Image (spheres, grey):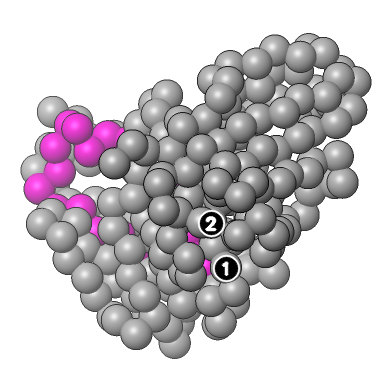
Amino acid sequence: KAGVTQTPRYLIKTRGQQVTLSCSPISGHRSVSWYQQTPGQGLQFLFEYFSETQRNKGNFPGRFSGRQFSNSRSEMNVSTLELGDSALYLCASSLAGINEQFFGPGTRLTVL
Amino acid sequence: GENVEQHPSTLSVQEGDSAVIKCTYSDSASNYFPWYKQELGKRPQLIIDIRSNVGEKKDQRIAVTLNKTAKHFSLHITETQPEDSAVYFCAASKNTGNQFYFGTGTSLTVIP
């Protein structure tokens, strides 16, 4: 079974721009969660989507948004980028319910 | 919300020795506790998990213990090997979706 994939793997943007990241979960997994990983803050939860609905949301500003499609693929969008948004963005998928999450390789976002 | 604390932040052991990493959580409703291993430049990989109805779980050289009363859980690695060198993260989750609260990570170095 193919693992979680994320595109693009690397991204460089400038302040004020917006960015869209994509995540394809493991086949059959309906839950997709997004995390921001930085050296100072560790892994912080952004949001979780299940069956095209946002099921949980972390404490991030409204500039961070996401969605999930009927095939369970998910995208996250960050608008009006700030320098502090530079991070590794990880998505993780799992089966319905509370199960182990499997992470993708991440998208490394650099904001200049 | 949930707060997960992890100690120590760095740990060095001699090859063959044991390593113990400890985490505490604040929300008594948390009932799922996974541990992830992240090697440099790679995605977090689930290595073991435990649910709140179990006190201990083992998988070869790795074990996790959970004390619900004290709200802490620990990762034990025996007979450490150089390939165990990585950053280890604990996490806690409630039965309300796949929103994981992560500890800040422990950088484990196994000295040959």
Q: Is residue A79 left or right of residue B70?
A: right
Q: Chain of mark 2?
A: A
**On the rendered image, what quadrant is the N terminus of chain B found in?**
bottom right
**On the rendered image, what quadrant is the C terminus of chain B found in?**
top left
Q: State yes or no: residue B78 in magenta.
A: yes
One can see residue A24 in this view = yes
Secondary element at tag 2:
strand
Does B63 appear above or below B69?
A: above
Secondary element at tag 1:
loop
What residue is shown at x 86% (from left), y 19% (from top)?
A17
Label 1 environment density (alpha carbons within 10 Å; few <14, some 14–19, many ≥20) = some
Foreground of the two, B107 or A8: A8
Magenta span of residues: B74-93
Identify residue type, mark 1. Gly
Identify residue type, mark 2. Ser
> Mark on residue A83?
none
